[in-house]
Image (cartoon, rainbow, N blue to C red):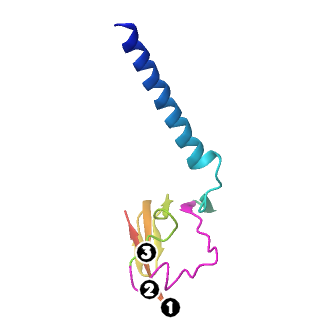
Amino acid sequence: MNRFLKWIIGLLVLVAIGVFVYSVLNDGLLKKPLSPKKIVSFKVDDIELKVFYNRPSKRNREIFGALVPYNQVWRTGANEATTFETNKSLKVGTDSLPAGKYTLWTIPNDSTWHVMFNR
């Protein structure tokens, strides 16, 4: 391999490392996330429930009926769908929810909400 080609490859590697470091620093290490990730755990007797979500922030915005429209499916959380995990079957309303991992979806309305679980 000639000297010029080695120099070009070295330069490309250096640029790639720089782009990677910049993206890591720009995406999370230097900025406080607007909707930080959270985990909530709940345990009663032998039932364990963990909820993984991005905590939304109002920041002087109208949320329900505006940012989150009424009568449309919403992923229920900021940035991505809220997920939860249970080690035992749960009864939700009249339905049975087997143990496992689920995403939570809702259809908000001004007075009532429809809740859906997706496996």
In percent of width and height, residue 76 lies at: 48, 71
Residue at x-position 44% and y-position 77%? 106
Tags 2 and 1 touching, CB below 8 Å: yes
The residue under label 3 is which amino acid type? Trp
Residue 110 badge: 1
Residue at x-position 44% and y-position 86%? 70
Q: Is residue 52 magenta?
A: yes
- Residue at the disc numbered 2: 70
The residue under label 1 is which amino acid type? Asp
Q: In the rendered structure, which disc, 3 or 1, sits on the residue that comes first in sequence?
A: 3
The residue sitting at the top extreme is 2
Label 3 crowd (10 A; few <14 / some 14-19 / many >=20): some
SS under mark 2: loop
SS under mark 1: loop
- Relative to 28, is 72 above or below? below
- Relative to 95, is 86 above or below? above
Q: CA distance from mark 3 to mark 1?
A: 14 Å
The number of discs equals 3
Range of magenta residues:
47-72
In percent of width and height, residue 64 lies at: 52, 83
The residue under label 2 is which amino acid type? Tyr
